Image (cartoon, grey):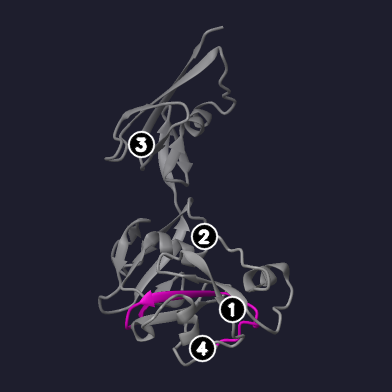
């Protein structure tokens, strides 16, 4: 995502990151994102624009069909109506979210209430909102009395059902066995080198030592097979790896 602005445009995010005050006159460079939390740069001339002006800077023509939110530095969302104003010179006002919808949906994430402007939200977006490491954390739906359900990164969860959905994030833990020994890992994939290191902590490939990695009881996408050097495999709980080496010296 390019965030560079032309000369003469005050980059609000850059000013905040540098710990300096945002200058008192425009134009101002801000970031405007969508429901996937993908942001692009936009320029606003007014230091105290209305919600309608921000939507227009985002290229929105019919402002009545869209919702606008401020994104605080802590990741919380605050809806900004078309006639409401925001002072871009205030610390923390550099990002906005735009949704094409006529109403927002309330959810709870890690005990924080969030108003979301789209009918659906992905597991990946929830993790972005929570500000956690995307590779090692997962997100779950708290079912209150039932078994909590993990929400996949690509899954689009429907928020339109009655009630407030409650989500939480936690470090993902997957147990695999490498050469019969259990290991707990926190990512959904393992590379060839990572598996070899789990088997032999001091492993080092050379012209004389070659490692072979096979696996079984994997997920449906790769239930069994051979992991080649430089490759990776999606993993699941209970997956079995076998690592052997050939010494040609």
- Residues at circles 2 and 4 in contact by the CB criterion of under 8 Å: no
**Crowding at label 2, few (<14), some or many (≥20) Cα neighbours within 10 Å?**
some
Badge nearest the viewer, 2 or 4: 4
Instruction: Give the x, y percent position of residue 141.
Output: 35, 65
The mark that comes first in sequence, 2 or 4, is: 4
Badge nearest the viewer, 2 or 1: 1
Report the span colored magenta: 86-106
Residue nearest the viewer, comparing 185 with 50: 50
Residue picked out by circle 1: 93
Instruction: Give the x, y percent position of residue 112.
Output: 47, 75
Mark-to-mark CA distance, 2 and 1: 21 Å
Is residue 91 one of those drawn in magenta? yes
Where 153 sits versus 203, above or below?
below
Badge nearest the viewer, 1 or 3: 1
Q: Which mark is residue 50?
A: 4
Describe the element under mark 4 as helix, strand or loop: loop
- Residues at circles 4 and 3 in contact by the CB criterion of under 8 Å: no
**Crowding at label 3, few (<14), some or many (≥20) Cα neighbours within 10 Å?**
many
Mark-to-mark CA distance, 2 and 4: 32 Å
Where 211 sits versus 248, above or below?
below
The image quarter containing residue 118 is bottom left
Residue nearest the viewer, comparing 106 with 183: 106
Mark-to-mark CA distance, 4 and 3: 54 Å
**Crowding at label 1, few (<14), some or many (≥20) Cα neighbours within 10 Å?**
some
Residue picked out by circle 2: 132
Badge nearest the viewer, 4 or 1: 4
**Crowding at label 4, few (<14), some or many (≥20) Cα neighbours within 10 Å?**
some
């Amino acid at each position: 995502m390019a965030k560079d602005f032309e000369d003469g445009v005050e980059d609000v995010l850059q000013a905040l990151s540098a710990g300096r005050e945002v200058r008192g006159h425009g134009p101002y460079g801000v970031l405007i994102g969508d429901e996937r939390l993908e942001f692009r740069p936009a320029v606003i001339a007014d230091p105290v624009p209305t919600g309608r002006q921000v939507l227009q800077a985002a290229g929105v023509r019919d402002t009545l069909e869209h919702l606008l939110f401020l994104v605080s530095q802590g990741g919380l969302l605050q809806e900004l109506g078309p006639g409401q104003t925001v002072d871009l010179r205030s610390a923390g006002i550099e990002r906005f979210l735009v949704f094409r919808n006529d109403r927002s949906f309330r959810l709870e994430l890690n005990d924080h209430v969030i108003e979301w402007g789209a009918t659906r939200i992905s597991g990946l977006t929830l993790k972005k909102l929570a500000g956690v490491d995307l590779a090692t954390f997962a997100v779950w739906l708290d079912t209150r009395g039932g078994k909590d359900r993990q929400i996949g990164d690509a899954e689009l969860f429907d928020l339109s059902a009655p009630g407030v959905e409650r989500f939480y994030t936690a470090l993902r833990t997957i147990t695999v066995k490498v050469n019969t020994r259990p290991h707990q890992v926190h990512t959904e994939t393992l590379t060839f080198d990572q598996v070899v290191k789990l088997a032999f902590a001091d492993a080092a490939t050379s012209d004389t030592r070659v490692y072979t990695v096979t696996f079984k009881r994997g997920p449906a996408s790769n239930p069994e097979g051979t992991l080649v050097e430089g490759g990776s495999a999606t993993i699941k709980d209970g997956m079995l790896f076998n690592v052997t080496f050939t010494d040609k010296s």
